[in-house]
Amino acid sequence: MDFDNYEMNNFYDELLEAPGRPRPGAAPLMNRLKTMPNADLIRHQKLAEAELLQMGITFMVYGSNEGAEKIFPFDVVPRVVEAKEWEQIEKGLIQRIQALNFFIDDIYHGQKIIKDKIIPEEMIKTSAGYRVQCQGLNVAKRVWIHITGTDLVRSDDGQFYVLEDNLRCPSGVSYVLKNRDVLKRTLPRVFQNMNVRPVDDYSHRLLNMLQYMAPPEITKPRIVVLTPGPYNSAYFEHSFLAQQIGAELVEGRDLVVIDGYVMMRTTKGFERVDVIYRRVDDDFIDPQTFRRDSKLGVPGLMDVYRAGRVVLANAPGTGVADDKAIYTYVPAIIKYYLNEDPILQNVPTYMCWEPTQRQYVLENLDKLVVKAVNQSGGYGMLVGPHSTKSEQEKFAGLINARPRDYIAQPTLSLSRVPIIAEDHFEGRHVDLRPYVLYGKSIYVMPGGLTRVALKKGSLVVNSSQGGGSKDTWVLGETIKKKP
Amino acid sequence: MLSRLADSFYWMSRYIERAENVSRFIDVNVNLMLDSSLSEDKEQWFPLVTTSGDEEDFKARYEEATRENVIYFLFADKKNPNSIFSCLQKARENARTMRESISSEMWEQLNSFYLMVQSYMHEPLDLDNLYSLGRQIRMASHQFVGVTDNTMSHGEAWNFIRLGRMFERADKTARILDVKYFILLPKVEDVGTTYDAILWTALLKSASASEMYRKKYSHIQPDKVAEFLILDREFPRSMRFCLAHAEESLRFITGTPYGTYANEAEQHLGRLRSELDYANIREIIKSGLHEYLDQFESNLNNAGVALFATFLAMQPIPGYPIIKRTEQS
């Protein structure tokens, strides 16, 4: 398969700088892809998919009963990010995560940022992610957002922008690790020649971070992964990560609070738990503190947490900082806490809460992307240029009724990467979600989940909406010579 | 180990064993009916439903115990919680919730077992493919045991798996013997005839026991068959063998020495096993085989309940000292 008839359609392509001309870092990969016989490449793709199915790397599709598990589609052509570019992303993410952590700590303590009139109090109090129950909470090592996965997109100007901050235990990292596994076997030589930076130490770093968070008097902390259970769409990932870090995978019903400690039920009696990597939402972790009807949580957990006898990663209440309206304040947040200019830029965003911006949004619904501030997964969204008049009218109504709940952004032209479309390559839009661990220091995984909108022309990369994934190759400083 | 996990190990294994045994029931009946020279409408299929213990459910949803209905009920019926398909579905669900705790070989084996059974779901089951299906099911179940034994550490989890398998097998062997004993009860004029021998051989076959039985006793005699399936020390599907191994696993898990007990599960199981150790087939038959087996099933059930209470459903007792982890340096 070659790239002779590959159409770029004026989009920024991650692998090619012009038709027929690969970007310098991607050249060895492109040469290999070109010389590989068609059948081989397709066979590798099919093998990779069969392997994912056999290993059970699946996600659950809500509302379907037969064969409820589906594989997350995977395309073998990797996305390449060059060393210099990555350096900027890494610096930018460290800066951003640090500032957001300061911000959350401030919101639940002195609220200096409100007193200094950087963010209006109303903005915070009306945020769906704000948890008044977390006021005054002293979290271990002052870290709130232990694990994050920031969504980045590259626009046609070649710049990376932050699209969303995901500060509530985002999923997807297991696909990064598995995709890499498959790619190392599919393209071993070119992988080695290009000096791709490893991601395989993620689990090790995750474990170190969780151990570091444990109360200091505990020398061998008991770490568990808390899952909502096998019917959750990300159950495979919960199970996989627990296995990788040697932790027990527990459900709420396995845990109980006794004498001020969190205990798990084992065949040998109750055992104390020190650190909980929880993949259950704030609302459901403790029916005594949050939603009373939750069956997924542990009654009394928050009391133990407040007393410092168990660590939760991530801390509850962090959703206040990934609210899509508060997102617009992140550059100001970085400036306020770090006194630095943001290294990574936001996508320009209009807040419907603000009357003049709302007016602009309402007049340009056919050009903008409108998003509900507390929804994710590609739900609650209006993509203006692809929408009908009546959809626009519906959103106008929604915005007028609850302006705080909506933001709007210009329709970005996302960058593209080639995928295998039957017997040739075609460009598809992608985003990038690198994972960040906040422990003793902040670690940014070199790579991350490249999500790709597999449907031709689509801009929506979410797995629930026909998205797939690719491996992400971040190159090291020097490129080895081809043998 | 997490109590919930222990529960999943135990049930995963019980369901696989159950699927295997249901397939054995079907297989032996097919054999019997073929040899009985009865026309299809005279065939006896209802005893099979009795063996599986789901008569009420069957009667409520089916009009007649025809061959077709009974086989569908036992193999493919999703509403029957003990059909082969339902058992495998539940075994697989249990395995799926603990993917991180079983070997990937076990998962793959169970997954392909399930997919194999599923592939027969939309086919009409007739005498042509029943035989090969039954063979595949039994083989897949044996493979699962083999893969488990060879890819998983023989620690606590493995012992919960064996415990489940042995409990289920002991129960099913008792049921096979109990129900068949009544159907097969020979008419005076049949005793000692070829037909009688065929019936008892079929019974042994349904427990994969006919070859091993013949090595030991050569002639088919009803009391010897009962003795073999209840009391044999060495045959892996006899009730005594199953309980001996179940107890071995239980004691591995708790560490309690033989001859003593530290919880109700050990008490129940230990008592039941030692009864079998010192039983005698003449006494059993004299007191009534059916009554004996009935009592056995009920005692086994109680042991299962005690097992659940001991390991799987612990509740904190206010004011009662609990085990806190001691610091290791």
Image (spheres, coloured by chain):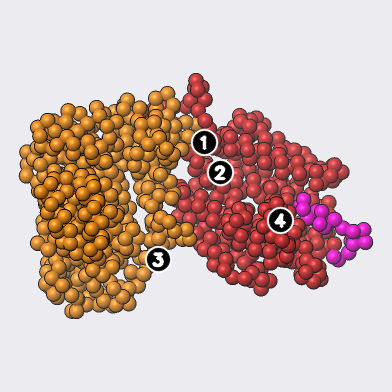
What mark, if any, has residue B160 been given in the picture? 2
- Chain containing the residue with disc 4: B
Magenta residue check for B182: yes
- Chain containing the residue with disc 1: A
Relative to A403, is A67 above or below? below
- Chain containing the residue with disc 2: B
Which amino acid type is shown beneath numbered disc 4?
Lys
Q: Marks 2 and 1, Cα distance to the nearest angstrom?
A: 10 Å
Q: Nearer the viewer, mark 2 or mark 4?
A: 4
Instruction: Give the magenta-colored segment's residue range.
Output: B176-195
Residues at marks 1 and 3 touching, judged by CB atoms closer than 8 Å:
no
Q: Disc 1 designates what residue?
A: A267
Color of chain B here? red
Asked if labels 3 and 4 share a chain, the reply is no
Which amino acid type is shown beneath numbered disc 3?
Ala
- Quadrant of the image occupied by residue B121: bottom right
Residues at marks 1 and 4 touching, judged by CB atoms closer than 8 Å:
no
Residues at marks 2 and 1 touching, judged by CB atoms closer than 8 Å:
yes
Toward the viewer: A203 or A428? A428
The residue lying at 68 percent from left, 64 percent from top is B69
Q: Which callout, 1 or 3, points at the residue further toward the start of the chain? A: 3
